[in-house]
Image (tube, coloured by chain):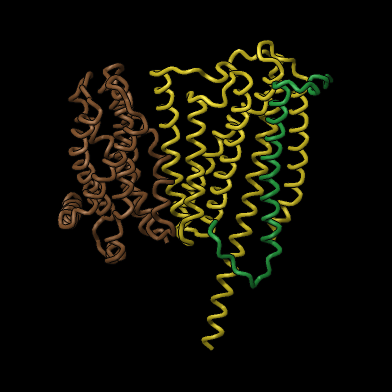
Chain colours: A yellow, B green, C brown
C-alpha cells in the first residue's frame, strides 16, 4: 500500500498546517479585527460565512470535473474511473457541508442584523438551490442499484453542473424584476482595509480545510472500493472452489 | 485581546457564539465521521461483505 | 431508416398504447384537478390575487400530475424487456428517448388543454397581458418538465424506491425552469411585467437540457 505511506505524512502535515491556519484566522476574525461600525460584533460571523460561501461554489466544479473523467474512463480504464468516482463523491459531500454552513451562518447573522431568519433574496435562494441539487445527488447515490451508482451519479452531476449557472442567473433576474430585502448587501464590497487580513486568512484556512476534507473522504471511498473488490474477488474464488 | 464583550449575554454575542460553534461542530463532526468510517472500513475482516449503497 | 423515422416509430407506438387504455391521461387529469381544488381551498383568492397566484398553481398542479405519468413511463418497456432489445438493435437509443418524451409532451398537453379552461373558470381569470404568448409558454414549460422527467425516470429504472427517487432528483434540476414558466404565466395573466426574459430562459434551458438528455441517454441505458 504505497499510497497510504505517502498520504500518511503529507496528510498529517497538511492537517497541522490547516489547524494552525484556522486557529490564526479565527483569532483574527473573532478578537483582533476591529469591530464593525454599523453592525457591531455580530458582523464577525461574516468572517466564517463569506469564505464558506465562496468555497461552496468551488467544490461543485470538482465534482463535475471528476464525473466527466469518470464517464470518459468508464470503458477505457476502469481503475482510473473508480478514482475519479471517489473524487466526485468527495466533492459532492464537501459541497453540502460548506453549503450547509453557509446557510446556517447566514441565517444566524440575518436573525441579528435583520430580525428575520430567512429571506428569499438572490444569494440565499441560489445557495439553497445549490444545496438541494447536491443533496439530491447524494440521494441518488444512496438509492440507486449497486453497479449502476457511479454512472448514474456522474450523469446527474453533469445535469447539476449545467443547472448551476442557470439557477444563479434566473434567481438574479427574479430578484431584479421583483426586488426584496437583501441580506448582507455589501459585505464583500466596501470592506475596510483593516478587515482584509481576517477575511483573507479565513479564506485560506477554510480552503486548506476543504482540501483536507476532500482528501479524507477520497481515502475513505477508496478504502470502501477496495473492500468491495476484495469481497467480489472472494466470491469468485469461492465459486471456483465449489466448481472443483 | 478584548474578551469582555463575549461575556455579556446580548443577542449579538450569543448568535456570534452559536455561529462559530456550529461551524466547528459541523466541520469537526464531518471530519470525525469520515475518520471513523475509514477506521471501521480498515478494521472490517476480510470475510465481511459490504452490501450498502454509498 | 432515418433518425426521425426511428423517433416516429417510438412516438406512434407510445401514442397508440396510451390511447388504448388512456390510463395516464385520465390519472393526470383528475390529479391535476384535485390539486387545483385543494389550492383553492388553501388560498381562496380574490380576482386580483388570483391573477398573481394562478400561474404558480397551474404549474405546480401540472408538475405533480406529470410525476404520476412519468413514474410509470418506462414500466411497459421494462416489463417487455424492450431496453435489453434496444441494446442489440442498431437503432439509436436517443431516438427511443425522444419518441417517448414527445409522447409524454402530447399527453401533458392534452391535460393542459382540458385544465386551462377549468382554471379560468375556477379563478375567474381574465388575461390582462398578451394572451397569445401563452401558446409559446405552455409548450416550452411542458417540454422542460417532460424532457428531464422522462430522462430521470429512466435513470431510476433499476433503483429500489424508484417512485421516490424521481421527484427528488427532478425537482431541484427543474427549479429554474419552473421559475421561468411560473413567472412567464403570471406576467402574461397579470400584465404587470415583461415575460420576455422568462421565455428566453425557458428556451435556453430547453436547448441545454434536451441536448444533455439526447447525448447521455445511451450512457444511462448501459449504466451497468
Camera sees residue A4: yes
Disc tally is 0
Residue at 43% over, 57% down? C161
Height in image: C7 above or below C41?
below
Tell me where residue C55 appears, x and y as whole percent: 30, 29
Height in image: C102 above or below A41?
below
Tell me where residue A114 appears, x and y as whole percent: 58, 18
Give the quarter of the figure containing the N terminus of chain C: bottom left
Left-right relation of C126 to A49: left
Height in image: C60 above or below A33?
below
Camera sees residue C196: no
Closer to us: C123 or A79: C123
Residue that sits furthest to the bottom in the current view: A244
Left-right relation of B34 to A170: right
Closer to us: A101 or C11: A101
Residue at 65% over, 35% down? A207
The quadrant in which residue C42 appears is: top left
Residue that sits furthest to the top in the current view: A37
Residue at 15% over, 57% down? C20
The quadrant in which residue C46 appears is: top left
Tell me where residue C120 appears, x and y as whole percent: 21, 29
Closer to us: A109 or A154: A109
Residue at 72% over, 18% down? A41
Tell me where residue A85 appears, x and y as whole percent: 53, 52
Give the quarter of the figure containing the C terminus of chain C: bottom left
Amino acid at each position: 500500500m504505497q499510497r497510504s505511506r505517502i498520504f500518511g505524512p503529507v496528510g498529517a502535515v497538511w492537517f497541522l498546517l490547516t489547524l494552525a491556519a484556522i486557529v490564526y484566522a479565527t483569532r483574527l476574525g473573532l478578537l483582533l479585527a476591529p469591530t464593525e461600525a454599523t453592525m457591531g460584533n455580530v458582523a464577525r460571523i461574516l468572517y466564517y460565512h463569506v469564505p464558506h460561501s465562496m468555497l461552496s461554489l468551488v467544490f461543485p466544479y470538482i465534482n463535475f470535473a471528476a464525473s466527466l473523467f469518470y464517464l470518459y474512463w468508464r470503458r477505457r480504464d476502469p481503475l482510473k474511473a473508480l478514482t475519479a468516482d471517489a473524487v466526485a463523491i468527495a466533492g459532492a459531500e464537501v459541497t453540502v457541508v460548506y453549503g450547509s454552513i453557509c446557510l446556517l451562518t447566514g441565517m444566524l447573522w440575518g436573525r441579528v442584523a435583520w430580525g428575520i431568519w430567512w429571506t428569499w433574496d438572490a444569494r440565499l435562494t441560489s445557495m439553497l438551490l445549490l444545496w438541494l441539487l447536491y443533496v439530491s445527488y447524494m440521494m441518488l447515490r444512496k438509492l440507486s442499484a449497486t453497479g449502476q451508482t457511479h454512472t448514474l451519479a456522474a450523469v446527474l452531476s453533469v445535469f447539476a453542473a449545467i443547472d448551476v449557472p442557470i439557477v444563479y442567473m434566473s434567481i438574479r433576474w427574479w430578484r431584479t424584476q421583483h426586488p426584496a430585502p437583501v441580506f448582507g448587501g455589501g459585505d464583500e464590497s466596501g470592506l475596510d482595509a483593516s478587515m482584509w487580513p481576517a477575511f483573507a486568512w479565513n479564506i485560506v484556512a477554510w480552503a486548506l480545510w476543504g482540501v483536507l476534507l476532500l482528501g479524507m473522504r477520497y481515502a475513505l471511498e477508496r478504502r470502501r472500493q477496495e473492500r468491495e473488490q476484495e469481497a467480489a474477488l472472494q466470491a469468485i474464488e469461492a465459486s471456483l472452489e465449489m466448481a472443483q | 485581546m478584548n474578551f469582555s464583550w463575549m461575556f455579556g449575554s446580548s443577542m449579538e454575542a450569543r448568535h456570534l457564539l452559536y455561529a462559530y460553534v456550529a461551524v466547528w461542530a459541523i466541520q469537526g463532526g464531518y471530519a470525525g465521521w469520515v475518520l471513523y468510517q475509514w477506521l471501521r472500513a480498515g478494521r472490517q475482516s476480510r470475510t465481511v461483505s459490504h452490501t450498502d449503497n454509498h | 431508416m432515418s433518425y426521425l423515422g426511428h423517433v416516429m416509430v417510438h412516438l406512434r407506438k407510445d401514442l397508440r398504447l396510451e390511447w388504448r387504455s388512456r390510463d395516464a391521461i385520465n390519472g393526470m387529469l383528475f390529479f391535476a384537478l384535485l390539486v387545483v381544488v385543494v389550492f383553492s381551498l388553501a388560498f381562496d383568492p380574490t380576482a386580483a390575487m388570483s391573477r398573481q397566484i394562478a400561474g404558480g398553481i397551474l404549474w405546480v398542479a401540472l408538475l405533480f400530475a406529470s410525476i404520476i405519468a412519468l413514474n410509470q413511463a418506462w414500466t411497459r418497456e421494462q416489463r417487455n424487456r424492450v431496453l435489453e432489445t434496444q441494446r442489440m438493435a442498431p437503432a439509436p437509443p436517443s431516438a427511443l428517448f425522444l419518441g417517448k418524451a414527445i409522447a409524454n409532451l402530447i399527453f401533458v398537453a392534452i391535460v393542459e388543454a382540458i385544465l386551462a379552461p377549468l382554471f379560468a373558470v375556477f379563478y375567474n381569470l381574465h388575461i390582462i397581458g398578451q394572451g397569445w404568448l401563452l401558446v409559446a409558454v405552455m409548450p416550452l414549460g411542458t417540454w422542460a418538465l417532460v424532457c428531464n422527467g422522462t430522462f430521470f425516470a429512466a435513470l431510476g429504472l433499476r433503483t429500489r424506491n424508484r417512485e421516490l427517487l424521481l421527484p427528488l432528483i427532478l425537482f431541484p434540476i427543474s427549479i429554474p425552469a419552473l421559475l421561468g414558466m411560473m413567472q412567464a404565466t403570471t406576467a402574461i395573466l397579470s400584465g404587470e411585467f415583461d415575460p420576455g426574459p422568462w421565455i428566453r430562459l425557458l428556451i435556453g434551458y430547453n436547448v441545454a437540457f434536451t441536448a444533455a438528455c439526447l447525448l447521455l441517454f445511451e450512457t444511462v441505458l448501459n449504466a451497468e
